[in-house]
Amino acid sequence: MQNHELEIIEIDKNENAKPIIEEGQLALDIYETKEAFIVLAPIAGLDRKEIEIMINEDVLVIKGERNYPKNIKEKDFLVKECYFGPFSRSILLPREADLKNVKAKFEKNILEITISKDKENGPTHIEIE
């Protein structure tokens, strides 16, 4: 098994998401509504049972492994653009993410993870007297 570096993206409302450490071949989009944070990741070639999703403290981790459907020798490739092998992606969740209210679905090769917001954990505004 190859040694892969981990990629963590920090969600900062004041700046764009920025990679801290790189790994893997899992592209994703993250957007926000008033009620939730939504992660979209296209994952072709896998069944939902082959994708692992977990939250460790405030980090969402998505991982799995794509395998070639046939035993293909490296020398037989004419063009090789698709990534096969293990992948993972880690996302540092914002403070207002409700880690107990997370749902995931996998339809048409798109993984969608919805993380509800906990308004009590959001930013606090302080009035100056």
Image (tube, rainbow, N blue to C red):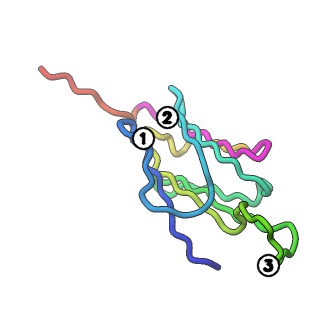
Q: At label 1, which amino acid type do we have?
A: Asn
2 or 3: mark nearer the eye = 3
Q: Looking at the image, is mark 1 or mark 3 nearer the viewer?
A: 3
The residue beneath circle 1 is: 16
Q: Residue at x 49, y 54 (%)?
A: 59
Q: Earlier in the sequence, mark 1 or mark 2?
A: 1
Circle 2/circle 3 CB separation < 8 Å: no
- Of discs 1 and 2, which sits in the foreground? 1
In the rendered structure, which amino acid carries the disc numbered 2?
A: Lys
Residue shown at 80%/68% (left/top)?
Answer: 78
- Residue found at the far front of this picture: 78
Residue marked by disc 2 = 117
Magenta stretch: dominant SS?
strand
Give the numbered dot on residue 69: none
Q: Is residue 78 above or below residue 129?
A: below
Q: Position of residue 89 (x, y in %)?
A: 56, 57
Identify the amino acid type marked 3. Lys
In the displayed structure, 55 sits above or below 129; it is below
Q: Earlier in the sequence, mark 1 or mark 3?
A: 1
Q: Residue 66: within the magenta? A: no
> What range is drawn magenta here?
106-119
Image quadrant where residue 61 sits? bottom right
* Residue underneath mark 3: 75
* C-alpha gap between disc 2 and disc 3: 50 Å
